[in-house]
């Protein structure tokens, strides 16, 4: 990337409801083309047509860019949502999250983690030992921003995802977001499932385990989804973590392996 890097952030909504959002880090030469791509993407979404669209463009110092590797992707096939959620708890516990804190997070996402009972725009921050919620605004949560995949890694990543039937923007963008999150100081694990009613998959990501997908973490038609970031408060100051998640530009310049799916019932 050149010395002039721009952060592009798009958000669109209709009737006050969030429709779509996307994040990119681009060179000056790509700025106009990628802005147009994001405009098109934000205007029309499977959930409807946008009434409001915000595109933020910020020049960021190239020397502040951190490089990370995408996590290794694995998929555990589960027969139903209940098994998917139990499996997610087991993986969170293996990553170092307290069992009660894991179960609480799953229950919060299932109920709609915002105090209004809907999905949050950002993520919950959760004490990995106690399960205590740490974000100052429980309606909004913490939004991870300023991350992207390096251009020369797009085709190689697609080549790995196509044979697995996973070449879609959900997986690609979640891998990049998870790469930034699990590279953060003090992060023990991330839990996510989508608020998109047509997308039932979710994942747990953790520094030592990679990105573990479960095709069923919620029922089709459910618009409640969200993210939880589990934090070890002995390892990081909360303000430092939030600044990293929101502000530090992170580019994924290397790929992890993408593994074929395995049956959860047959795990060793
Ligand atoms: P998505 O995977 O885009 O359907 O997002 C699922 C949920 O993750 C959303 O409902 C939000 O609660 C949360 N989320 C989405 N984008 C971000 C982000 N950039 N940072 C933190 N949380 C997010």
Image (cartoon, grey):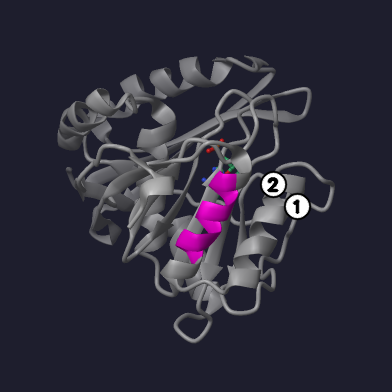
Which quadrant: the C terminus? Answer: bottom left
Secondary structure that dominates the magenta span? helix
The answer to whether 170 is drawn above or below residue 2 in the figure is: above
Label 2 vs 1, first from the N-terminus: 2
Mark identifier at residue 120: 2
Q: Secondary structure at mark 2?
A: loop
Mark identifier at residue 139: 1
Q: Tell me which residue sits at (64%, 41%) in the image.
A: 225
Q: Tell me which residue sits at (41%, 18%) in the image.
A: 36
The answer to whether 79 is drawn above or below residue 87 in the figure is: above
The verdict on residue 113 being magenta is: no
- Horizontal side of residue 139 vs 131, given as left or right: right
The answer to the question of whether label 2 and label 1 lie on touching residues, with beta carbons closer than 8 A, is: yes
Q: Find residue 224 and report its image quarter.
A: top right
What are the residue bounds of the magenta stretch? 83-92
Q: Foreground residue, 85 or 144?
A: 85
Q: Is residue 146 visible?
A: no
The answer to whether 259 is drawn above or below residue 13 in the figure is: below
Q: Is mark 2 within 8 Å of ligand 1?
A: yes
Report crowding for label 1: few under 14, some 14 to 19, many 20 or more residues within 10 A (C-alpha).
some
């Amino acid at each position: 990337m050149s010395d002039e890097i721009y952060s592009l952030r798009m958000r669109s909504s209709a009737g006050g409801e969030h429709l779509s959002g996307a994040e990119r880090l681009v060179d000056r030469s790509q700025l106009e083309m990628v802005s147009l791509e994001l405009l098109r993407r934000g205007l029309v979404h499977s959930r409807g047509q946008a009434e409001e669209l915000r595109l933020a463009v910020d020049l960021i110092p190239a020397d502040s860019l951190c490089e990370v590797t995408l996590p290794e992707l694995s998929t555990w096939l589960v027969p139903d949502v209940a098994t998917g959620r139990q499996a997610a708890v087991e993986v969170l516990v293996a990553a170092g999250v307290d069992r009660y804190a894991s179960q609480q997070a799953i229950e919060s996402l299932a109920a709609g983690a915002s105090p209004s009972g809907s999905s949050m725009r950002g993520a919950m921050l959760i004490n990995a030992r106690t399960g205590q919620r740490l974000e100052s605004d429980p309606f909004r949560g913490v939004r991870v921003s300023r991350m992207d995949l390096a251009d020369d890694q797009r085709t190689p990543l697609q080549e790995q995802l196509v044979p697995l039937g996973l070449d879609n923007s959900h997986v690609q963008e979640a891998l990049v977001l998870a790469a930034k999150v699990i590279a953060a100081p003090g992060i023990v694990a991330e839990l996510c499932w989508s608020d998109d009613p047509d997308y039932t998959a979710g994942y747990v990501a953790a520094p030592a385990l990679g990105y573990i997908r479960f095709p069923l973490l919620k029922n089709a038609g459910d618009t409640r989804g969200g993210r939880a970031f589990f934090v070890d408060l002995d390892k990081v100051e909360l303000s430092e973590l939030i600044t990293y998640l929101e502000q530090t530009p992170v580019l994924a310049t290397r790929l992890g392996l993408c593994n074929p799916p395995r049956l959860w019932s047959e795990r060793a």
